[in-house]
Image: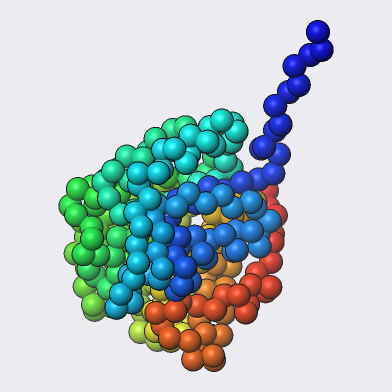
Amino acid sequence: MPDKPMPPDHNRQKKIAVINDMTGFGRCSLAVSIPVISRLGVQCCAVPTAILSNHTGYPSFFLDDYTKHFTAYTDEWKKLRLRFNGILTGFLGSAEQFALVGRFLSGFSDAGTIVCVDPVMGDYGKVYSSYTDEMCRAMRELVRRADIITPNLTEACILTDMPYHERKWTRRELDEILTRLKALGPRKIVVTGIPQGEFIANLSCADGGAPSLTRQHRAGESRSGTGDVFASVVIADAVNGVPFDRSVRRASAFVKKCILRSIELDIPTTDGVCFEEVLGKLKWEKGNE
């Protein structure tokens, strides 16, 4: 009898699974991650948590919750024996979705998988109205399983029980936030969107090293999807071995390019950033981190 043929190996190329919603208009979530991660030479495999016509920042929208399909969808990936070099999680809409993501991490990652959690919970000092106390606690537990986290300042405060305020943040306060975030377990942390007068800053730390504060001149108003752009660059760079401090600078610079081009074209802030116009300037780098 002839030998039974070996099943095809679907894990020859670097892959990142991105668990987030798919929004048709508004440039956020999976609609951003897929092209950005692909541009950086990594296959992006989407796990939709919901399907939206446009994001919830618009006056009205269509939304189809995909929670009920999550298990059947990912069970097909188990049949293909898929493994991932990276996993990125974004907005999660219910406590049930947190449990499903936890099972996904257990089923599709191994010691070499880099897990990046973008803890999308709020902005401007407020928790999103859809987020319950239970979901905030669940996000803290998810962060404990992450290698990298990319909270904005509001989300960092929520995760650490630090009070948010509008006055200038002192370096002592920021270092305290970073200390509390490190205690949750992630090896690499970047707190984004820290206002500093005419500047906007990111505070990062990797593998217990010294904190690094990088600043850029503020460009325009806050726009939807910039956090998704930033996190997508960071996770793809991590899989490609780019050093974390360099990746944070690259992601920040690219987001700024996207914002400036969007201002030039007078794109409404709800419509996100026209990253398509500057995507060619985002270079695929390889490192050896």
Q: Quadrant of the N terminus?
A: top right
Position of residue 114 in the picture relative to residue 40 (left or right): left
Position of residue 128 in the picture relative to residue 280 (left or right): left
- Give the farthest residue toward the right: 2
Percent x, y for residue 187?
A: 45, 46
Numbered circles on residues, count: 0
Residue 242, quarter of the rendered image: bottom right
Q: How is the image coloured?
A: rainbow
Q: Is residue 32 above or below residue 215?
A: above
Name the residue located 26 percent from the left edge and 46 percent from the top edge: 95
Percent x, y for residue 113?
A: 54, 39
Front residue of 60 and 129: 60
Percent x, y for residue 75?
A: 48, 34
- Tell me if residue 213 can be seen: no
Name the residue located 24 percent from the left edge and 52 percent from the top edge: 136
- Tell me if residue 275 can be seen: yes
Name the residue located 24 percent from the left edge and 79 percent from the top edge: 167
Percent x, y for residue 259?
A: 50, 81
Q: Is residue 247 above or below residue 263?
A: above
Name the residue located 52 percent from the left edge and 51 percent from the top edge: 46
Position of residue 241 in the picture relative to residue 159 (left or right): right
- Give the farthest residue toward the top: 1
